[in-house]
Image (cartoon, rainbow, N blue to C red):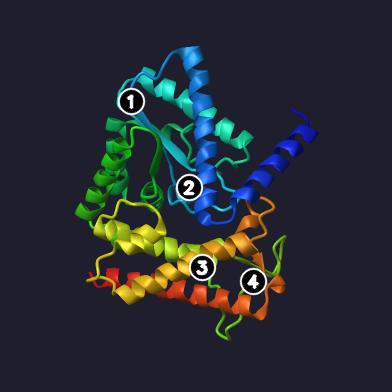
Amino acid sequence: MNVSDDSNRNGIKVKMLADASFSNEQLNHFHDLVYDQVLTAALSKVSNEYGPPPSPFSFFVMGSAGRIEQSIWSDQDHGLVFTLNTDEAQEYFLKVGVEISEGLENAGYKKCSGSVMASNPLWCKSMDDWETQLVLWVGESTWESIRYLLIFADARSIYGTPGMVSRLKEKAFDEVKREQLLLRMLDNTMYMKKGVGVLGQLLVETHGAYSGSINLKETAFLPFVNAARLLSFYEGIKETPTLSRISRVSIDLMPVQDKSLYSKNFTALLDYRLKHGSNSDYDSGHYVNTSKLTKDEKKSLKEILKVGEQFYEHVRKMLERM
Protein backbone atom coordinates (compact mmCIF):
# COMPACT_ATOMS: atom_id res chain seq x y z
CA MET A 1 0.00 0.00 0.00
CA ASN A 2 1.42 3.39 -0.94
CA VAL A 3 1.32 6.68 0.97
CA SER A 4 -1.75 7.98 -0.84
CA ASP A 5 -3.62 4.76 0.04
CA ASP A 6 -2.69 5.27 3.70
CA SER A 7 -3.90 8.88 3.58
CA ASN A 8 -7.20 7.89 1.97
CA ARG A 9 -7.74 5.12 4.50
CA ASN A 10 -7.03 7.44 7.44
CA GLY A 11 -9.21 10.14 5.92
CA ILE A 12 -12.14 7.74 5.66
CA LYS A 13 -11.61 6.64 9.25
CA VAL A 14 -11.44 10.21 10.52
CA LYS A 15 -14.74 11.02 8.80
CA MET A 16 -16.40 7.91 10.23
CA LEU A 17 -15.05 8.73 13.68
CA ALA A 18 -16.28 12.31 13.41
CA ASP A 19 -19.73 11.02 12.54
CA ALA A 20 -19.62 8.77 15.61
CA SER A 21 -18.23 11.37 17.98
CA PHE A 22 -21.38 13.06 19.19
CA SER A 23 -21.03 11.24 22.51
CA ASN A 24 -18.66 8.97 24.37
CA GLU A 25 -21.20 6.14 24.08
CA GLN A 26 -21.52 6.43 20.30
CA LEU A 27 -17.78 6.74 19.84
CA ASN A 28 -16.98 3.64 21.87
CA HIS A 29 -19.72 1.68 20.13
CA PHE A 30 -17.98 2.56 16.87
CA HIS A 31 -14.63 1.31 18.23
CA ASP A 32 -16.25 -1.98 19.25
CA LEU A 33 -17.66 -2.40 15.74
CA VAL A 34 -14.20 -1.90 14.23
CA TYR A 35 -12.72 -4.42 16.65
CA ASP A 36 -15.45 -6.92 15.77
CA GLN A 37 -14.67 -6.62 12.05
CA VAL A 38 -10.93 -7.01 12.63
CA LEU A 39 -11.47 -10.03 14.89
CA THR A 40 -13.75 -11.71 12.37
CA ALA A 41 -11.21 -11.20 9.58
CA ALA A 42 -8.30 -12.41 11.75
CA LEU A 43 -10.12 -15.57 12.83
CA SER A 44 -11.19 -16.26 9.26
CA LYS A 45 -7.61 -16.00 8.02
CA VAL A 46 -6.16 -18.24 10.74
CA SER A 47 -9.02 -20.75 10.40
CA ASN A 48 -8.49 -21.02 6.65
CA GLU A 49 -4.79 -21.73 7.16
CA TYR A 50 -4.75 -23.82 10.37
CA GLY A 51 -8.32 -24.98 10.94
CA PRO A 52 -10.98 -23.80 13.40
CA PRO A 53 -10.11 -22.69 16.95
CA PRO A 54 -9.13 -25.77 19.00
CA SER A 55 -11.16 -24.69 22.04
CA PRO A 56 -13.53 -22.04 23.38
CA PHE A 57 -11.80 -18.71 23.95
CA SER A 58 -12.38 -15.09 24.84
CA PHE A 59 -10.73 -12.02 23.39
CA PHE A 60 -10.70 -9.10 25.81
CA VAL A 61 -9.70 -5.45 25.70
CA MET A 62 -8.16 -3.40 28.53
CA GLY A 63 -7.16 0.21 29.12
CA SER A 64 -9.60 2.84 27.89
CA ALA A 65 -11.18 0.25 25.53
CA GLY A 66 -11.86 -2.03 28.48
CA ARG A 67 -13.43 0.85 30.40
CA ILE A 68 -15.43 2.03 27.33
CA GLU A 69 -13.67 5.39 27.58
CA GLN A 70 -11.70 5.61 24.33
CA SER A 71 -11.15 8.91 22.61
CA ILE A 72 -11.29 9.36 18.83
CA TRP A 73 -7.84 7.77 18.55
CA SER A 74 -6.84 4.79 20.67
CA ASP A 75 -3.95 2.39 21.05
CA GLN A 76 -4.11 -1.36 21.57
CA ASP A 77 -4.46 -3.09 24.95
CA HIS A 78 -5.86 -6.60 24.67
CA GLY A 79 -5.44 -10.29 25.49
CA LEU A 80 -6.72 -13.82 24.89
CA VAL A 81 -7.76 -16.66 27.17
CA PHE A 82 -8.66 -20.18 25.96
CA THR A 83 -9.66 -23.42 27.68
CA LEU A 84 -7.35 -26.02 26.10
CA ASN A 85 -4.02 -26.08 27.94
CA THR A 86 -1.67 -27.41 25.24
CA ASP A 87 1.31 -26.03 23.34
CA GLU A 88 -0.62 -26.44 20.10
CA ALA A 89 -3.51 -24.32 21.39
CA GLN A 90 -1.05 -21.67 22.60
CA GLU A 91 0.60 -21.59 19.17
CA TYR A 92 -2.77 -21.32 17.42
CA PHE A 93 -4.10 -18.47 19.51
CA LEU A 94 -0.82 -16.56 19.34
CA LYS A 95 -1.27 -16.62 15.55
CA VAL A 96 -4.76 -15.20 16.08
CA GLY A 97 -3.30 -12.55 18.38
CA VAL A 98 -0.72 -11.52 15.79
CA GLU A 99 -3.39 -11.21 13.08
CA ILE A 100 -5.60 -9.15 15.38
CA SER A 101 -2.77 -6.81 16.33
CA GLU A 102 -1.72 -6.32 12.70
CA GLY A 103 -5.32 -5.81 11.64
CA LEU A 104 -5.95 -3.22 14.33
CA GLU A 105 -2.78 -1.36 13.37
CA ASN A 106 -3.98 -1.28 9.76
CA ALA A 107 -7.29 0.10 11.04
CA GLY A 108 -5.47 2.97 12.77
CA TYR A 109 -4.99 1.62 16.30
CA LYS A 110 -1.41 2.16 17.42
CA LYS A 111 0.33 -0.91 18.85
CA CYS A 112 0.86 -0.84 22.60
CA SER A 113 4.38 0.39 23.39
CA GLY A 114 4.48 -2.03 26.34
CA SER A 115 3.29 -4.96 24.18
CA VAL A 116 0.10 -5.50 26.20
CA MET A 117 -1.43 -7.38 23.27
CA ALA A 118 -2.70 -10.87 22.46
CA SER A 119 0.31 -11.29 20.15
CA ASN A 120 2.49 -11.43 23.29
CA PRO A 121 2.54 -14.80 25.16
CA LEU A 122 2.26 -12.89 28.45
CA TRP A 123 -1.25 -11.82 27.45
CA CYS A 124 -2.30 -14.93 25.49
CA LYS A 125 -2.73 -17.97 27.75
CA SER A 126 -4.91 -20.91 28.63
CA MET A 127 -7.31 -20.54 31.55
CA ASP A 128 -5.02 -22.64 33.77
CA ASP A 129 -1.96 -20.63 32.82
CA TRP A 130 -3.82 -17.35 33.33
CA GLU A 131 -4.85 -18.38 36.85
CA THR A 132 -1.25 -19.31 37.62
CA GLN A 133 -0.06 -15.99 36.19
CA LEU A 134 -2.46 -13.95 38.33
CA VAL A 135 -1.33 -15.77 41.49
CA LEU A 136 2.29 -15.17 40.48
CA TRP A 137 1.72 -11.43 39.94
CA VAL A 138 0.08 -11.12 43.35
CA GLY A 139 2.84 -13.14 44.99
CA GLU A 140 5.63 -11.10 43.38
CA SER A 141 4.05 -7.77 44.42
CA THR A 142 6.64 -5.82 42.41
CA TRP A 143 5.85 -2.46 40.83
CA GLU A 144 5.58 -4.16 37.43
CA SER A 145 3.42 -7.08 38.55
CA ILE A 146 1.04 -4.74 40.37
CA ARG A 147 0.85 -2.60 37.24
CA TYR A 148 -0.16 -5.73 35.31
CA LEU A 149 -2.89 -6.48 37.86
CA LEU A 150 -4.21 -2.93 37.55
CA ILE A 151 -4.22 -3.26 33.75
CA PHE A 152 -6.02 -6.61 33.94
CA ALA A 153 -8.70 -5.14 36.22
CA ASP A 154 -10.00 -3.23 33.17
CA ALA A 155 -10.41 -6.39 31.06
CA ARG A 156 -13.70 -6.55 29.14
CA SER A 157 -14.55 -9.51 26.92
CA ILE A 158 -15.77 -8.43 23.48
CA TYR A 159 -15.55 -11.70 21.52
CA GLY A 160 -15.99 -15.35 22.44
CA THR A 161 -17.02 -16.71 25.84
CA PRO A 162 -17.28 -13.77 28.29
CA GLY A 163 -17.58 -15.93 31.41
CA MET A 164 -13.92 -16.89 31.12
CA VAL A 165 -12.74 -13.33 31.78
CA SER A 166 -15.24 -12.94 34.63
CA ARG A 167 -13.80 -16.05 36.27
CA LEU A 168 -10.25 -14.73 35.95
CA LYS A 169 -11.20 -11.35 37.40
CA GLU A 170 -12.83 -13.10 40.34
CA LYS A 171 -9.55 -14.95 40.89
CA ALA A 172 -7.52 -11.73 40.67
CA PHE A 173 -9.77 -9.88 43.10
CA ASP A 174 -9.72 -12.75 45.59
CA GLU A 175 -5.93 -13.01 45.47
CA VAL A 176 -5.45 -9.24 45.94
CA LYS A 177 -7.80 -9.26 48.91
CA ARG A 178 -6.15 -12.35 50.44
CA GLU A 179 -2.67 -10.83 50.19
CA GLN A 180 -3.89 -7.35 51.24
CA LEU A 181 -2.26 -5.64 48.27
CA LEU A 182 -4.45 -2.55 48.07
CA LEU A 183 -1.96 -0.24 49.76
CA ARG A 184 0.76 -1.43 47.37
CA MET A 185 -1.64 -0.72 44.50
CA LEU A 186 -2.28 2.72 45.94
CA ASP A 187 1.47 3.42 45.97
CA ASN A 188 1.61 2.34 42.32
CA THR A 189 -0.92 5.01 41.31
CA MET A 190 0.13 8.04 43.36
CA TYR A 191 2.44 9.73 40.85
CA MET A 192 0.15 11.96 38.80
CA LYS A 193 0.65 15.38 37.27
CA LYS A 194 -0.98 18.37 38.93
CA GLY A 195 -3.35 20.20 36.62
CA VAL A 196 -3.91 23.35 38.69
CA GLY A 197 -1.18 25.41 40.37
CA VAL A 198 -1.21 27.02 43.82
CA LEU A 199 -2.34 30.31 42.26
CA GLY A 200 -5.26 28.63 40.49
CA GLN A 201 -3.58 28.58 37.07
CA LEU A 202 -3.78 25.65 34.64
CA LEU A 203 -0.41 23.89 34.53
CA VAL A 204 0.45 23.42 30.86
CA GLU A 205 3.38 21.78 29.07
CA THR A 206 6.26 24.27 28.91
CA HIS A 207 8.24 22.76 26.04
CA GLY A 208 7.96 20.30 23.18
CA ALA A 209 5.26 19.75 20.58
CA TYR A 210 2.45 20.38 23.08
CA SER A 211 3.81 23.49 24.75
CA GLY A 212 0.91 25.58 26.03
CA SER A 213 -1.39 22.53 26.23
CA ILE A 214 -2.56 20.56 29.24
CA ASN A 215 -2.30 16.76 29.28
CA LEU A 216 -5.83 15.60 30.12
CA LYS A 217 -4.82 11.96 30.46
CA GLU A 218 -2.26 12.56 33.18
CA THR A 219 -3.87 15.47 35.02
CA ALA A 220 -7.60 14.75 34.67
CA PHE A 221 -8.33 11.14 33.70
CA LEU A 222 -5.83 9.30 35.88
CA PRO A 223 -7.15 10.58 39.24
CA PHE A 224 -10.72 9.47 38.38
CA VAL A 225 -9.71 6.20 36.72
CA ASN A 226 -7.22 5.14 39.39
CA ALA A 227 -9.53 6.01 42.28
CA ALA A 228 -12.45 4.09 40.78
CA ARG A 229 -10.24 1.10 39.91
CA LEU A 230 -8.89 0.89 43.47
CA LEU A 231 -12.46 0.98 44.76
CA SER A 232 -13.36 -1.86 42.39
CA PHE A 233 -10.70 -4.05 44.03
CA TYR A 234 -11.82 -2.98 47.51
CA GLU A 235 -15.47 -3.80 46.88
CA GLY A 236 -15.14 -6.56 44.27
CA ILE A 237 -16.79 -4.51 41.51
CA LYS A 238 -16.31 -6.39 38.22
CA GLU A 239 -17.68 -3.71 35.88
CA THR A 240 -14.98 -1.73 34.13
CA PRO A 241 -16.35 1.74 33.21
CA THR A 242 -15.34 4.41 35.72
CA LEU A 243 -18.95 5.62 36.00
CA SER A 244 -20.21 2.08 36.69
CA ARG A 245 -17.57 1.58 39.36
CA ILE A 246 -18.53 4.82 41.09
CA SER A 247 -22.25 4.01 40.97
CA ARG A 248 -21.68 0.58 42.55
CA VAL A 249 -19.64 1.78 45.51
CA SER A 250 -21.55 1.17 48.72
CA ILE A 251 -23.07 4.18 50.46
CA ASP A 252 -21.19 3.14 53.61
CA LEU A 253 -17.95 4.02 51.81
CA MET A 254 -19.15 7.01 49.85
CA PRO A 255 -22.23 9.18 50.38
CA VAL A 256 -24.67 9.57 47.50
CA GLN A 257 -23.83 13.26 47.06
CA ASP A 258 -20.12 12.45 46.67
CA LYS A 259 -20.83 9.71 44.13
CA SER A 260 -23.02 12.14 42.21
CA LEU A 261 -20.33 14.84 42.25
CA TYR A 262 -17.62 12.48 40.97
CA SER A 263 -19.86 10.94 38.31
CA LYS A 264 -21.06 14.32 37.07
CA ASN A 265 -17.51 15.63 36.71
CA PHE A 266 -16.17 12.50 35.02
CA THR A 267 -19.02 12.65 32.51
CA ALA A 268 -18.15 16.31 31.92
CA LEU A 269 -14.51 15.28 31.39
CA LEU A 270 -15.44 12.74 28.70
CA ASP A 271 -17.49 15.40 26.90
CA TYR A 272 -14.75 17.99 27.39
CA ARG A 273 -12.15 15.80 25.70
CA LEU A 274 -14.41 15.21 22.70
CA LYS A 275 -15.11 18.91 22.33
CA HIS A 276 -11.66 20.39 23.00
CA GLY A 277 -9.08 17.64 22.39
CA SER A 278 -6.74 18.12 19.43
CA ASN A 279 -7.51 14.60 18.12
CA SER A 280 -5.37 14.83 15.00
CA ASP A 281 -3.65 11.58 16.09
CA TYR A 282 -3.32 9.31 19.14
CA ASP A 283 -0.81 11.42 21.07
CA SER A 284 -2.49 14.78 20.42
CA GLY A 285 -5.80 13.39 21.63
CA HIS A 286 -4.55 13.63 25.21
CA TYR A 287 -3.93 17.38 25.00
CA VAL A 288 -6.00 20.56 25.06
CA ASN A 289 -4.51 23.89 23.99
CA THR A 290 -5.59 26.22 26.79
CA SER A 291 -5.08 29.35 24.65
CA LYS A 292 -8.10 28.26 22.60
CA LEU A 293 -10.37 27.97 25.64
CA THR A 294 -12.76 30.68 26.77
CA LYS A 295 -12.73 31.91 30.36
CA ASP A 296 -15.76 29.73 31.18
CA GLU A 297 -14.18 26.68 29.52
CA LYS A 298 -11.04 27.14 31.61
CA LYS A 299 -13.18 27.48 34.73
CA SER A 300 -15.02 24.25 33.90
CA LEU A 301 -11.74 22.40 33.36
CA LYS A 302 -10.34 23.64 36.68
CA GLU A 303 -13.46 22.36 38.45
CA ILE A 304 -13.09 18.93 36.82
CA LEU A 305 -9.43 18.77 37.81
CA LYS A 306 -10.21 19.83 41.38
CA VAL A 307 -12.94 17.21 41.77
CA GLY A 308 -10.74 14.48 40.28
CA GLU A 309 -8.02 15.24 42.80
CA GLN A 310 -10.61 15.31 45.58
CA PHE A 311 -11.94 11.89 44.51
CA TYR A 312 -8.48 10.33 44.51
CA GLU A 313 -7.66 11.84 47.91
CA HIS A 314 -10.95 10.49 49.28
CA VAL A 315 -9.99 6.97 48.19
CA ARG A 316 -6.37 7.32 49.33
CA LYS A 317 -7.37 8.35 52.85
CA MET A 318 -9.97 5.58 53.01
CA LEU A 319 -7.45 2.88 52.04
CA GLU A 320 -4.78 4.21 54.41
CA ARG A 321 -7.26 3.90 57.28
CA MET A 322 -7.83 0.21 56.55
Q: Is residue 160 visible?
A: yes
Q: Which mark is residue 297?
A: none
Foreground: 301 or 110? Answer: 301
Picture layout, residue 64 above or below residue 204: above
The amino acid type of the residue labelled 1 equals Pro
Q: How many marks?
A: 4
Q: Residues within 10 Å of mark 4 (few under 14, many from 20)?
A: many
Contact (Cβ within 8 Å) of mark 2 with mark 1: no
The amino acid type of the residue labelled 4 equals Val
Contact (Cβ within 8 Å) of mark 2 with mark 4: no
Q: Residue at x 46, y 34 (%)?
A: 118
Name the residue beneath numbered marker 2.
65
Q: Residues within 10 Å of mark 2 (few under 14, many from 20)?
A: many
Mark 2: which secondary structure?
Answer: helix
Name the residue beneath numbered marker 3.
268
Foreground: 272 or 138? Answer: 272
Q: Is residue 120 left or right of residue 17?
A: left
Label whose residue precedes the other's in the sequence (3 or 1): 1
3D distance between C-alphas at marks 3 and 1: 40 Å
Q: Is residue 169 left or right of residue 76?
A: left
Q: Residue at x 28, y 75 (%)?
A: 255
3D distance between C-alphas at marks 4 and 3: 20 Å
Label whose residue precedes the other's in the sequence (2 or 3): 2
Q: Which mark is residue 56?
A: 1
Name the residue beneath numbered marker 4.
204
3D distance between C-alphas at marks 4 and 1: 48 Å
Contact (Cβ within 8 Å) of mark 2 with mark 3: no
